[in-house]
Amino acid sequence: MATLQMYMDRSRIDNMFTSEVYGEVWGNEFGVDNSVGKIRKILIHRPGEELKQLAEGSYEEEAGARILKSRDGKRIRNYFKSHKLPDIGLMQEQHDRMAEILRNNGIEIFYLEDPSYYWTNLTFTRDVALMLPKGVVLTRFAMYFHQGDTCITQKFMAEQGIPIIGAIQGRGTVEGGSFSMLDAHTAIVGRSVRINDAGIEQLRTLLSYQDIELIVVDMPAYYIHLDEAFLPVDKEKILVSTFILPHWFLKMLKERGYQLIETDMEDPMLTNNCLALEPGKVLFSASGVKTRKNLEKAGVETIPVDISEINRLGGGIHCSTLPLWRMPVS
């Protein structure tokens, strides 16, 4: 028997991520090892019935937003940055236009759905997971109103046959809006009120299994995610908010050969929250007129889309999209 087991040991898989067997088992139509390669598949959620619950909320001056709370008043279930109720019809029109542009660019769209309609923040699919070269890491949210998202996402990934290679657990918190694959061996995470040290260390361990280095950037207290200040838009070009990001980080990017394109301070918040559809081509907020000019001057093509009503939920284009499969870039 020992001889048989020694013989069988010839077929041992020492590293599943580097073995050709991984693709044989899981396929190759998923994975993200950069932030600008051509998108093939993407996950979004069309805002809908769940947002009608915001009518049960009320405007709170302290928050500067309409706040929806649980019936016992102990938990915040969502917010909307307006005294008025959301115009769900307009929000859907804007989201449908965004989806149309994605399809016109050859991207296969998948929708994340919650049959219960209880969880009200699914519009921002970026936060539910971290797509890596060899699979997905499920996030863990700090705030109550996102807690159901992980369960819904886990079911979706399983149905699509995308390997779940880890999850942020316990006291750790990480959200996808604060994560970016700079290149195949470098990832960046923004530490903030939503992303803590315990979550970052768990993420660092999971990334190390794929030989990916993690760089940590501290975000100012007013900002919750990295994608409010940092978005790669081409192979060697990054849109940055220099008035938010630390000097050492901007210097490091320049030393690595990246051209930094400025977000104009006079443009509205979330202007830079764009999505690279392929190298040098981005889906961009129509309201960011001055920053669009900066991008086009730098040779980056922009496709403007109005998401003003979606913005009132607290996110933008990048927040509303999770690429499931991007092509590698040289």
Image (spheres, helix red, strand yellow):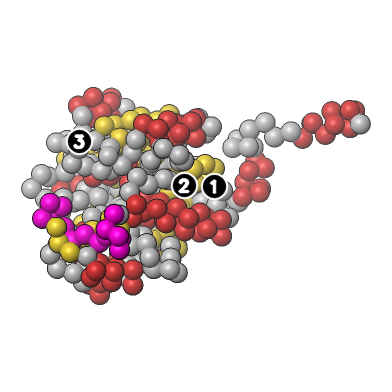
Q: Earlier in the sequence, mark 3 or mark 2?
A: 2
Are discs 2 and 1 less than 8 Å apart at CB?
A: yes
Q: Residue at x 45, y 69 (%)?
A: 115
Does 155 appear above or below 7?
below
The main secondary structure of the magenta stretch is loop
Q: Quadrant location of residue 139?
A: top left
Q: Which mark is residue 164?
A: 1
**Image quarter (top left, top right, bottom left or bottom right) of the C terminus:** top left
Q: In the rendered structure, which amino acid carries the disc numbered 2?
A: Leu
Q: Which mark is residue 325?
A: none
x and y percent of residue 107 in the render? 42, 61
x and y percent of residue 12 in the render? 74, 33
Q: Which mark is residue 138?
A: 2
Label 2 – label 1 distance at C-alpha = 7 Å
Q: Is residue 185 visible?
A: no
The stretch drawn in magenta includes residue 64: yes
Q: Which residue is mark 3?
A: 220
Q: Quick one: 170 or 48, which is closer to the camera?
A: 170
Q: Is residue 295 visible?
A: yes
Q: Quadrant location of residue 263?
A: top left
The magenta stretch is: 61-74
Q: In the rendered structure, which amino acid carries the disc numbered 3?
A: Pro
Q: Residue at x 38, y 41 (%)?
A: 174
Q: Residues within 10 Å of mark 2 (few under 14, many from 20)?
A: many
Which secondary structure, mark 3? loop
Q: In the rendered structure, which amino acid carries the disc numbered 1?
A: Ile
Q: Earlier in the sequence, mark 2 or mark 1?
A: 2
241 displayed left or right of 278: left
Q: Quick one: 39 or 308, which is closer to the camera?
A: 308
The stretch drawn in magenta includes residue 107: no
Q: Quick one: 266 or 86, which is closer to the camera?
A: 86
Label 3 – label 2 distance at C-alpha = 25 Å
